[in-house]
Amino acid sequence: MAALALSSQAAYAQEAQDDSAEQAAASILQPEIIVTARRKAEDIQKVPISVTALGSDQLRAAGITKVSEIAAVVPGLNLFFVGSETNAVYSIRAMSRGSLGFQQPAVTTYVNDVPTTIFGAALPTYDLGNLQVLKGPQGTLFGRNSEAGAILTNTRQPTYDYNGYADLQVGDYSWMKAEGALNIPVIEDKLAIRVAGVVNRRDGYQKNLSFPGRDFANLDSNAFRVSVLAEPFEGLKNVFVYENFSAATNGIAAQLLTYDPNSMGLPNNFAGTPFAFVIPLTQQAYEDQLANGPRTGTAPFPLSTRDKRETISNTTSLDIGSVTIKNIFGYQKNYVEAYVNQAGYAFPLIPGYRFVDYRQVTEELQLSGKAFNDALTYIVGGFYLDFRPSGTAYELVAPPGTYDFTVPSLASPGPPPVFAPLGSGNYYRDKSKSAYSQINLAFGAITPALEGLSIDAGLRYSKDDHSLCSIGGQLPQTAASEDTCLQDPARKASSSEDFWSYTLGVNYQVTPEILFYGVTRRGYRSGGLNAPILGGTLAAAGAQSFSPETVTDYEVGLKSRFALGTVPVTFNLALFQADYKDLQYAVNTNGINQVLAATGGVDGDFNPGNNPTALYFANVGDGRVKGLEAALSVRPVPSLQLSGGMSVLDFAVNKNTFVPPVNFPAFLTPGIKSFEATVFYGAPKFSYNASVAYTLPLPSEVGDVVMRAKVNGSGKINYDAITVPARAVLDLRLDWNSVLGSDVDLSAFVTNVTDKLYVAAPNLGSPGAFAFTSGTYNEPRIFGFEARWHFGPQ
């Protein structure tokens, strides 16, 4: 989005002017914010793309301590979680990704210019340099292709000064978060090291009525990072970063949100079967949930969750005259182990187990520079990604009454299974190879008559290969190895595709403070494979693979900063339309297999072992997303800062090409409206934020005391059959920086002041498949305090 979400970084630097009046006006404008959205450092107001940026000070002032809070300061960005807060799904301009399976995200996330894995999109929020949110298709400038946007997270790099900080936050639910960093210059102007870490503990706010003492939605994580900066000689720079993250929590319990006794969906379809007793049990569970309240939950077993991540990035840049050669290497290893209870009550109607053990290696080489008296700026690059199993990936669902997914590290207390689990263990691989280039031609450097006019042109070629080897419902401790799996051709599948994408833009810098731009881009989301190896009518219909989803978008924008008398103002606006082809759609099979049991399951072959575990992806037709994004920042007096931003979206599926399996009953066959609720999953049509910061008029020796308030909200959000009503959430914060002239900062804050309740993480909610919906509510109101000590340049 073209706007800054927080006012303190929504204004920009004074440009030297010859005219004295212009100098006076420029002198009251606020300092510029430097971003790297176009792979070079530049003022955000001169960047002709929709981008939001938050620096380390702004992140702290906004109270950003975890991933879920980022969306509160970026209108148009929505996120939700699957299973735990470490498995985040991001939505920008109405596009996100399926909650399960191997679909690529519409929004690519980066840490230090390295794209994260599809299982590791939870971003670090400690000791950050900045966070940037780019909107619209990306790919002709860097990294992996992205059709809806990208989130760039940059950790703080070492410097050649001694500096550091220690930060402690405490609050409700026995919350304690300790964070710190130490920067050490080892060799003057040659070598420096920065070490940072965080420990985050909090009791759960969702009372566990089934297993007292294991309350849901708790926090228990540790992370540390070591960064090394080396500049052995002028022109050569290398930054190495190692990060380790681990979390072990009680999980998030889904809760019954609704129940329809007249529905034909699960479990009501059990009428007349040995499982008919589940029907009144579900009705009673729903009534109990209403009586117990929204901050409670039940489960048939502990919903333990383990998450471990190791990441390495190494960025080397070499300046040779006006040319820069940069190499970006990335390595990530993700390990996730989680029990889930999708139904949301104590009977194991749809219990599940998720196990992920994957690694990813990326390599990117760039050549950039300027030519023709700086009229031409260019970048040329190549990108390679290899995503493969270190172990395997499991998404298992058991039939009603069975749930013992016993794993040595997370022993479930359930009885032995009566039937083999549905679902599969899979060895999945992705390889992506790309070449890209983009230029900017500034006509003002050629002739003064065209001063301020420039064009951007970029092109990218991508080749993606996918392979799958499925070992069925074998549990991790007995699973066949990948080598053994590959020896059986019947267990293997593969697909590939290539694609050309482009960027073409025209920019006009009317004055140093006003920019108009227009851009059209073509992007795509790669196709992939469904798991396990399918059979029956699904195999016959070619459902084993799904095709790429493509988009062509058009965007015009204004970026401006000006003064109304002595009042600095920043106003940014972006209007856009994105036309999609071959939209990818998550076809729900969770519950449908049971509904269609009498006719052989979702594929009609009476073999549950080759049915999709919970969903499979298909291409359903074409669609359109259009909207506007705007932000305004005003400083009426030096001590008062006001800002606000909003996003308005309109989206629709306008062509239906989906062919359902031949045995799908009519009441389960999706129509266009159902497609829209799933394709544009979790996308509000209207979202906004607003903030105010007032600095008290106190003597400088007292320090800076700043009162802050921010509100964020959205219109209703659809998660398939789950509709979340419009909401607004208010946060308050009081900062006392440099207390009595010291290096100590103190803060008090309260989040969700009005204790607003809404569904933050959807679970089950597919029309026709289920007689109920389930999900998880947001955090309650939390009071907290923060103390921070810092030394050296910050």
Image (cartoon, grey):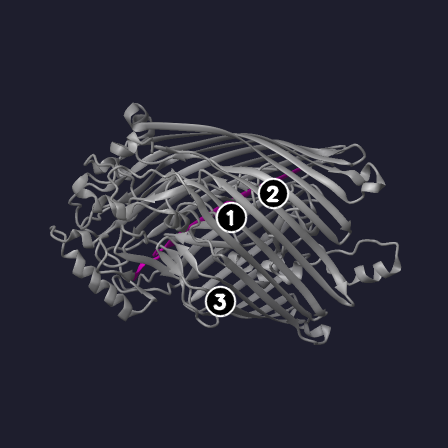
Does residue 602 lie above or below 207 as drawn? Answer: above
Label 3: few (<14), some (14–19) or many (≥20) C-alpha neighbours in 10 Å: some
**Camera-side residue: 627 or 631?**
627
Label 3 SS:
strand
Front position among marks 1 and 3: 1
**Camera-side residue: 358 or 709?**
709
Q: Is residue 134 left or right of residue 604?
A: right
Q: State which tag comes first along the sequence, 1 or 3.
A: 1
Q: CA distance from mark 1 to mark 2?
A: 43 Å
Query: Where residue 415 appears, x then y in whole percent?
Result: 17, 50
Q: CA distance from mark 2 to mark 3?
A: 42 Å
Please report contact status of discs 1 and 3: CB closer than 8 Å, yes or no.
no
Q: Which residue was labeled with disc 2? A: 228
Label 2 SS:
strand
Magenta residues (range): 237-257
Label 2 amino acid? Val
Q: Which residue was labeled with disc 3? A: 728
Label 3 amino acid? Ala
Label 1 SS:
strand
Q: Which residue was labeled with disc 1? A: 625
| Residue drawn where x is 44% and y is 32% of the image | 430
Does residue 785 lie above or below 407 as drawn? Answer: below
